[in-house]
Image: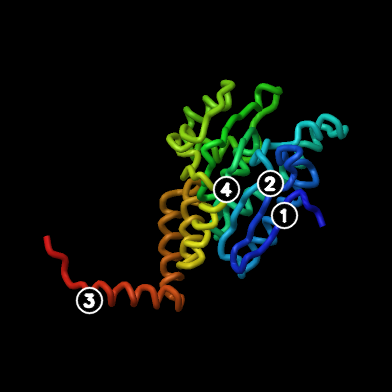
Amino acid sequence: MSDSILYTRDGALARVTFNRPASLNAMGFEMGRRWRDLAHEITADDSVGAVLLDAAGPAFCAGGDVIEMATSGATGADVTDMAHVIHDGIRTFVESDKPIVAAVQGAVAGGGLGLMLTADYIVASSRAKFVSRYANIGLTPDLAVSTLLPAAIGQTRALRLLLQDVTIDADTALDWGLVAEIADDPARRADEVAAFWLENATAAFGQAKRLIRAGAQRSFADNLDDEARTIGARFGTPEAQARVAAFASASRTKGPRQG
């Protein structure tokens, strides 16, 4: 079994760890296939309630492994094929009903931005740095960067990162909306976020994530139809029935609010 990405379970929590620290967790050909296969395995597993994405070593992810591309004899067609493989994994995670939190402990570059943004909630270290560097080496965005990056920070800021040699720090990333939180210990904080989902209605959090992610790609009418179907389906579950009943009971006990 490959160790380029580690997959471990802690109850309903699936932990996915980029594990090529000597290569700054750059995603090569084998790692890309491992990413795709894990995405399908995890999202199809009903026993998984939440996913935590993290990385070994000083960097989170340096994007695609350009050194491997340059030294392996790969052709442009090979690179295109591998991009499709990695994109399959990204799409599978993003479109799933599994809420994903990422712990970003260090630098994120190039396609690493897209892999990071596969997560729905990103906790970064104050030491984290974020940079594009695609055009610097004559390449163009991949790994969903052209879609997920402007969705997170807006088109103008995305273009600034992609068209200028700009590196932003964690505070700027938080201000821009690239990350959700900064924490001294992002791994521990990401564990807390995942635990919050799992201790509560994790399936409802997952469906909320799915609705938001899908909504950007569809018509308003289609989004409303999906919302109606989803809330009705959730209302019919024993978990939701119990939670709604408890909420209604607590509200009756408190009585009307005083102005």
How far separated are the C-alphas under marks 3 and 4?
A: 40 Å
Q: Tag 4: Cα neighbours inside 10 Å, few (<14), some, or many (≥20)?
A: many
Residue at the spot 47% in from the left edge and 52% down from the top edge:
212
How far separated are the C-alphas under marks 1 and 3?
A: 48 Å
The residue closer to the viewer here, 161 or 233, is 161
Residue beneath label 3, please?
A: 253
> Given the image, on which type of amino acid does mark 3 rest?
Thr
Question: CB of mark 4 within 8 Å of CB of mark 1?
Answer: no
Q: Tag 2: Cα neighbours inside 10 Å, few (<14), some, or many (≥20)?
A: some
SS class, disc 1? strand
Whichever of callouts 4 and 1 sits on the residue coming sooner in the sequence is 1
Residue at the spot 51% in from the left edge and 44% down from the top edge:
184
SS class, disc 2? loop
Q: Tag 1: Cα neighbours inside 10 Å, few (<14), some, or many (≥20)?
A: some
The percent coordinates of residue 41 (x first, y second) are 69, 61
Residue at the extreme front: 184
How far separated are the C-alphas under marks 2 and 3?
A: 50 Å
- Mark 2 vs mark 1, foreground winner is 2
Residue beneath label 1, please?
A: 6
Q: Tag 3: Cα neighbours inside 10 Å, few (<14), some, or many (≥20)?
A: few
